[in-house]
Image (spheres, rainbow, N blue to C red):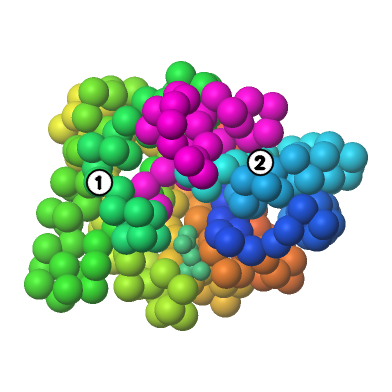
Amino acid sequence: MIPRMRAVIVAGNWKMHTTPADAGELAATIARRTNEPDVVRVLCPPYVCLAAVRDALATEPAGRDVAVGAQDVHHEVAGAYTGEVSAPMLRGLATWTIVGHSERRRDAGETDALVNQKIQRALEAELRVILCVGEQLEDREAGRAGTVVRDQVLGSLGGHQSGSWLTIAYEPVWAIGTGRTARGVDAAEMAGVIRRTLGELGFAAGGEDIPVLYGGSVTGGSIDEFMAEPAIDGALVGGASLKPDEMAAIVDRAGLTAAARAAAATA
Ligand code: PGA
């Protein structure tokens, strides 16, 4: 059955790519190539490119509906944290932020407790949050994927019971940047784990209204498998989000799901 109307979302995580000189043009090109009003589109460039992307999208007619997101926020509002960027600093630059990406968990040692604080800071700054969770390969092989992801959701979201601001991206670590994707059925099963855990936390309707995206080597060639799953509401795209052709194909496929859901909701 097609679920109750949840938004279909495609978010691009540009990671440490692009410069202020080229990011605006890339964003405008992607906006033109993905002009699909039923799909929520978010582009997350590096901090130093946020202004260029914001300005390019504001002047591109197809860009007005494309949101700008940051890739992270600090867990404090201000202070002696050299090189860091806090949530209030993003006002006027971004309306979304990713938190808890596995590359930050890996490289910056971010824990679920820290991610929980970051989410709090993001909310205070009225940012919409894409929370990333996902297991390592050894967890999956040991049959622990569900437990690991449940713990991440509990730790990152403890204290919250509703979330019109929240999107969760299930990103198995072994699928990120490897060209290897999860199977659609496995991603759907993990979306089930995530929503059951939201239910445990006390989220209304067992988290049924919270969008869950898949992330990990998504391309125009692999998106279909995920969008065919009613439990999956879109994708968090890394490498392919720098390629307008790939983004066009991904958003195109996401648009089919969005249209099918809209038709089911009015039937
Ligand atoms: P990838 O990255 O699409 O390059 O695997 C996804 C992500 O890290 O969000």
Q: Earlier in the sequence, mark 1 or mark 2?
A: 2
Instruction: Give the crowd class for mark 2: few <14, some 14-19, many >=20 residues within 10 Å.
Output: many
Residue found at the far top of this picture: 124
Q: Where is residue 80? Give x, y as percent.
A: 43, 31
Query: 52 or 221, which lies in front?
Result: 52
Task: Give the side of residue 152 with respect to residue 226, left or right.
Answer: left
- Start-end of magenta stretch: 73-101
**Is disc 1 placed on a helix, strand or loop?**
loop
Task: Give the side of residue 198 with respect to residue 176, left or right.
Answer: left
Snapshot quadrant of residue 75: top left
Q: Which residue is mark 1?
A: 111
Disc 1 residue type (three-letter): Thr
Q: Which residue is mark 2?
A: 68
Q: Is residue 19 magenta?
A: no
Q: Where is residue 248? Give x, y as percent.
A: 71, 64
Relative height, residue 221 to residue 111 (above, below): below
Which residue is at a point 24% across and 43% down the rendered structure image? 112
Relative height, residue 161 to residue 148 (above, below): above
Residue found at the far bottom of this picture: 179
Query: 75 or 148, which lies in front?
Result: 75
Which residue is at a point 56% across and 59% down the rendered structure image? 15
Which part of the image, by quadrant, shows the C terminus? top right
Does any portion of residue 98 appear in the rendered image? yes
Does any portion of residue 41 appear in the rendered image? no
Disc 2 residue type (three-letter): Val
Which residue is at a point 23% across and 23% down the rendered structure image? 159
